[in-house]
Amino acid sequence: MTKLQLPSNSKMLDKSFTYGVATASFQIEGGKEHRLDCIWDTFCNTDGKIADSSNGEVACDHYNLWQDDVALIDSLGVDAYRLSISWPRVMLQDGTLNQDGVDYYLNIINALNDRNIKVYVTLYHWDLPQYLEDTGGWLNRQTAYAFAHYVDLISKAFKGKVHSYATLNEPFCSSYLGYEIGVHAPGIVGKEYGRKSAHHLLLAHGLAMQVLKENTPETMNGIVLNFTPCYPASNSEADLYATDFADQYFNQWYIKPIFDKCYPDIIKDLPTEHQPDIQSGDMEIIAQSIDFLGINFYTRAIYKAHPDDIYEQLPAPAPLTDIGWEIYPKAFSELLVSLDSKYQLPPVYITENGAAMDDSIDQGVVNDDDRLSYYQQHLNAVNDAIEQGVDIQGYFAWSLMDNFEWAEGYLKRFGIVYVDYETQKRTIKKSGLAYKELISNR
């Protein structure tokens, strides 16, 4: 396979459909000496947390190589670039802007604008300043207000230069992985913490939306949520119940408050100490209207009933990516259609989709046919959802380049560009070349 192909009548072949690539600050930037510590620095320095004992202090050295990387993005012919702002790079502990950090991003944003590449900014992609974690992090309600303050200052600093803002990336990961099972920073473990942190994250989103509507009403403002659709192991009543519970807990928990001003029904089944601390007016703040919904999709999960717990996730069946996630594109189109029927969605953007594969470079060439196949199947799945009436207006490949893959360190490669971490040399993979060709031939 050498090409990515869509049906000739596909709306995804229209010039109005946005194609982009995406990255996150902590995963690519490095330049740690030019910012304050974040929770991922602390997590990386804790024994046993990162698979290869690595950290983000250099990463892809995008802090120093950003000009080359902007040229690389431009060479792919994309319409847009989704990047995230490192909160501890642009803010000082006293609540004022770090102008050096702001200027770093302004240089990138201006360079992208000069090349007619639309700038999609994610305001929070997991790198919470450590000084805020020291006062409770997302378990502290005040962190939501600190976030709104940061968004206020940075949206004013970037005025007129950004196409779109996403408040949060994947609050599920921040709350569940970070504060409930502890496999992500800050590594806190306890069922009593997951929903509480999730509520403060969603509150932060709502407060930030109010700020963005005031400061930059001309930009497209929204949130990015990840979904892992839940499928039952059988059609037994017990398995169906377990699967529905898991879906409410992992997926609907983060979207339902935004559109329906309430948490899923299972909230009443949770022990009181596991429930979030909801104050008067919170749900109205969370349910601010949004201009777009970003959806991140990688895989599905299969559940069955568990005798001692409510649900049990089964091992993922083949075929698998290098990170162990099932390749099941049908779940992608089914997810998009189901969300569209369940909620009054604004325009949807696929803000992340991609695959970790066991890439190797041979004489300057990376033949990642497995990733190319993954993209082909998932672009078709998006097209299927569009044909069923879902208003999807853009697609961002995850990721622009191989990078620090959180708890996996540098062991898993998601990029459409190969990074040699010794030399920092970038090489566009076969999938990247195919993506470029798809975009340029619209």
Image (cartoon, rainbow, N blue to C red):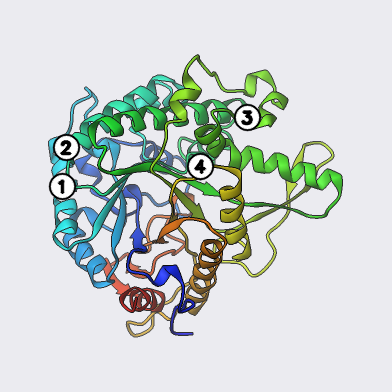
Name the kind of residue labelled 1 in the image: Leu
Picture residue at 43% right of the left edge, 39% below the top:
43
- Whether residues under marks 2 and 1 lie with C-beta atoms below 8 angstroms apart, the answer is yes
Which x, y percent locates residue 414? 44, 63
- Other-residue count near label 3 (Cα within 10 Å), few / some / many at <14 / 14–19 / ≥20: some
Depicted 409 relative to depicted 319: above or below? above
Q: Quadrant of the C terminus?
A: bottom left
Query: Which residue is denoted by mark 1 in the rendering?
Result: 106
Alpha-carbon span between mark 4 and mark 2:
28 Å
Direction from residue 436 to residue 328 in the image, left or right: right
Name the kind of residue labelled 3 in the image: Lys
Query: Which residue is denoted by mark 3 in the rendering?
Result: 191
Residue 157, labelled with which disc?
Answer: 2
Which x, y percent locates residue 49? 49, 44
Please report whichever mark, 3 or 2, sits nearer to the chain's N-terminal start.
2
Which x, y percent locates residue 301? 66, 54
- Whether residues under marks 3 and 1 lie with C-beta atoms below 8 angstroms apart, the answer is no
Depicted 15 relative to depicted 141: above or below? below
Alpha-carbon span between mark 3 and mark 4:
14 Å
Name the kind of residue labelled 4 in the image: Cys
Please report whichever mark, 3 or 1, sits nearer to the chain's N-terminal start.
1
Picture residue at 32% right of the left edge, 24% below the top:
146
- Other-residue count near label 1 (Cα within 10 Å), few / some / many at <14 / 14–19 / ≥20: some
- Whether residues under marks 4 and 1 lie with C-beta atoms below 8 angstroms apart, the answer is no
